[in-house]
Amino acid sequence: MILSGVIVNSVAVGLGSLLGVFFRNKFNKKIIDTVMSGMGLCVLYIGISGSLKGQNILVAIGSIALGGIIGELIDIDHRLRKFGLAVEAKFKSDTEESLVEGFLNATMVICVGAMAIVGSLQSGLIGNHEILYAKAFIDLFVVLAMSATMGIGVFFSAFLILFYEGAIVLFAGTLSPFLSALVIDEITCVGSLVIMAIGFNILGITKIKVANLSLAPFIPIFIYLFM
């Protein structure tokens, strides 16, 4: 089944989120704050390690710049926030931050990374779901920690990842002629830079609109297409 890796990943995110919410009330604020800081450091580590795969700094700079311009013009952050607020209104969440911020942060962490893109491409191109299965295992624990600190909003990222990864899998055949090993390395690098921004946000150092950079990892495909 071509979407089996995507489905397993989505289910793992949903399950991890629910477990995190369940355990949330069993910890005091000090523990939650410490776990949140630890999560920020872990996300930074993932971003830094992946960013080192890049081989051309100009491609990374251009991809971030172009991705940011396109993201701001579309205003992806605003659209995702509107979606989160609509869901919050429907479920009558207690606070905006507990749902919207949790939804946005979790969506960016689990969708923007190189594993989501490369794993989905492998599923669609050669039917190999190993990367997405491994990602599902990692995501389960990541979102468990995030939902324990950010609330139920994290759960709704499971639906976004189903759509996001599913779309990449289904359109992978169209992209295959443009995906050399070099391009995949640059996709990994740019995606990891965006993940670093998430880590800084979680730590409270910055307030970057990461959603508006979410298209940046796809820009290397077009850069190398015209090089």
Image (cartoon, rainbow, N blue to C red):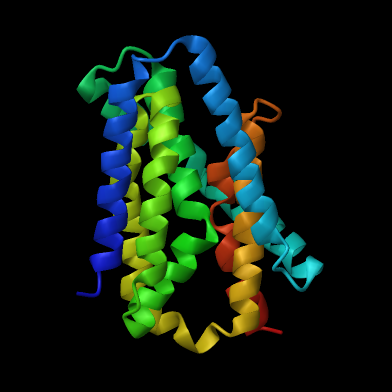
The x and y percentages for residue 98 are: 40, 21
Q: Residue at x 36, y 55 (%)?
A: 136
The x and y percentages for residue 37 are: 60, 27
Taking the image as shown, residue 127 lies to the left or right of residue 224, namely: left
Q: Nearer the viewer, residue 110 or 16?
A: 16
Q: Nearer the viewer, residue 157 or 65?
A: 157
Q: Nearer the viewer, residue 42 or 14?
A: 42
Residue 79 sits in quarter? top left
Taking the image as shown, residue 176 lies to the left or right of residue 156, namely: right
Q: Residue at x 70, y 52 (%)?
A: 48
Taking the image as shown, residue 41 lies to the left or right of residue 129, namely: right
The x and y percentages for residue 191 are: 59, 58
Residue 190 sits in quarter? bottom right
On screen, 5 above or below 13? below
The x and y percentages for residue 157 are: 35, 42
Q: Is residue 81 visible?
A: no
On screen, 222 above or below 99? below
Q: Residue at x 54, y 27 (%)?
A: 36
On screen, 111 above or below 87? below
Q: Is residue 32 visible?
A: yes
Quadrant the C terminus occupies: bottom right
On screen, 70 above or below 130? above
